[in-house]
Amino acid sequence: MIRHPYSQSLSRRPASLFTALRPHGASPVSINDARSLLAASSLDLLRFEPTSPTIAGALWEAEVELGADGEACLALRVACAPSPARAFELASMVAGRFDVTQADLEAARSSGTSMHVSATLEDPLGDFHDVLRVLASVAPDAVLVFDIAALSVRPASWLEGAAFARTPPAPE
């Protein structure tokens, strides 16, 4: 059984668990760079606090809080870690169902670092959209995206399109 690092913190509410693989040779995103990328985004960043990593081998992890009109509305965890060892194998198993190309798979095979975002969703569609926006902000160079909760893998172009659309993507 494959377990995502955040799966132990799931509650009865829907959970969103994403991993974005970054290109071969890309330097790991520093915690300060991640904070700056989120602060520069259109998201209302209320809090960004480093915390003890829960992912084995993680370079860093942070608790993030987004708001609307100054009120907290979504708590997330964001982390930078080495790319999961089995990422290429998993992507290869389901790639045909999600418009993942051979070039996407090759980029995944050589990925060295990854960004992880997780949240428990209060407002499933709106919060899901915000999770995608956070991931797109901290991993703008993503080559492949895993939606762990949906057991799917998507090309980076899907993340960009879904994150910056005016409305949340339709559930599958």
Image (cartoon, rainbow, N blue to C red):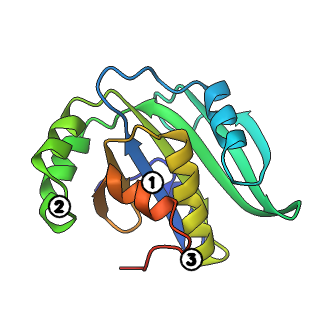
Q: Is residue 5 visible?
A: yes
The answer to whether the residue labelled 3 contacts the one labelled 2, judged by CB atoms less than 8 Å apart, is no
Q: Which residue is mark 2?
A: 94
Mark 3 or 2: the one toward you: 3
Q: Amino acid at mark 1?
A: Phe
Determine the secondary structure under disc 1: strand
**Amino acid type, mark 3:** Leu
| Residue closest to the far right | 70
Residue topped by disc 3: 125
Would you identify the image quadrant in which residue 75 lies? bottom right
Q: Relative to 19, is 66 above or below?
A: below
- What separation in Å lies between label 1 and label 3 (alpha carbons)? 15 Å
Q: Secondary structure at mark 2?
A: helix
Residue 67 in the image: x percent, y percent?
79, 60
The residue carrying mark 1 is 18
Instruction: Decide which of 42, 121 is in the foreground and name it.
Output: 42
Q: State how far apart marks 3 and 2 are (Cα).
A: 24 Å
N-terminal label among 1 and 3: 1
Q: Where in the figure is residue 131, as x and y percent of width and height?
A: 57, 59
At x 80%, y 45%, the residue is: 47
Can residue 13 be seen by looking at this rendering? no
Q: Is residue 104 left or right of residue 13?
A: left
- Please name the residue shown 43% across and 54% down the image: 160
